[in-house]
Image (spheres, rainbow, N blue to C red):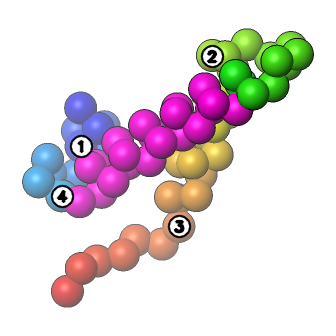
């Protein structure tokens, strides 16, 4: 589970948001790979790159809801 891996409670917003971001990155990667017919990079590599890009954007300062 994502929550356990990041040290958050399952009821927190962050794990749910992270799951959504990863899912969106995977979908975008598949679409990008499909549109690039001659792309020499494997689909798995494109997905890894997209997920890394998305997660890197989430490593900013912590935000709390008040």
- Residue at image point 20% right, 86% down: 66
Sooner in the amino-acid sequence: mark 3 or mark 2? 2
Q: Which mark is residue 3?
A: 1
Q: Nearer the viewer, residue 21 or 15?
A: 21
The answer to whether the residues at label 4 and label 1 have Cβ atoms under 8 Å apart is yes
The answer to whether the residues at label 2 and label 4 have Cβ atoms under 8 Å apart is no
Circle 1 Cα neighbour tier, 10 Å, few/some/many (<14 / 14–19 / ≥20): some
Position of residue 32 measured from the top left corner of the image (x, y, whole percent) = 70, 32
Tell me the CA gap for discs 2 and 4: 29 Å
Sooner in the amino-acid sequence: mark 2 or mark 4? 4
Q: Secondary structure of the magenta portion, mostly?
A: helix
Q: Secondary structure at mark 1?
A: helix
Sooner in the amino-acid sequence: mark 1 or mark 3? 1
Residue 25 placement, left or right of 32: left
Circle 3 sits on which residue?
60
Magenta region: which residues? 13-32
Q: Nearer the viewer, residue 42 or 6?
A: 42
Of marks 1 and 2, the one in the foreground: 2
């Amino acid at each position: 589970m994502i929550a356990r891996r990041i040290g958050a409670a399952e009821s927190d917003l962050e794990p749910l948001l992270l799951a959504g971001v990863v899912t969106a990155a995977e979908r975008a990667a598949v679409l990008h790979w499909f549109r690039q017919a001659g792309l020499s990079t494997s689909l798995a590599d494109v997905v890894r790159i997209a997920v890394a890009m998305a997660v890197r954007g989430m490593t900013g300062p912590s935000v709390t809801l008040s």
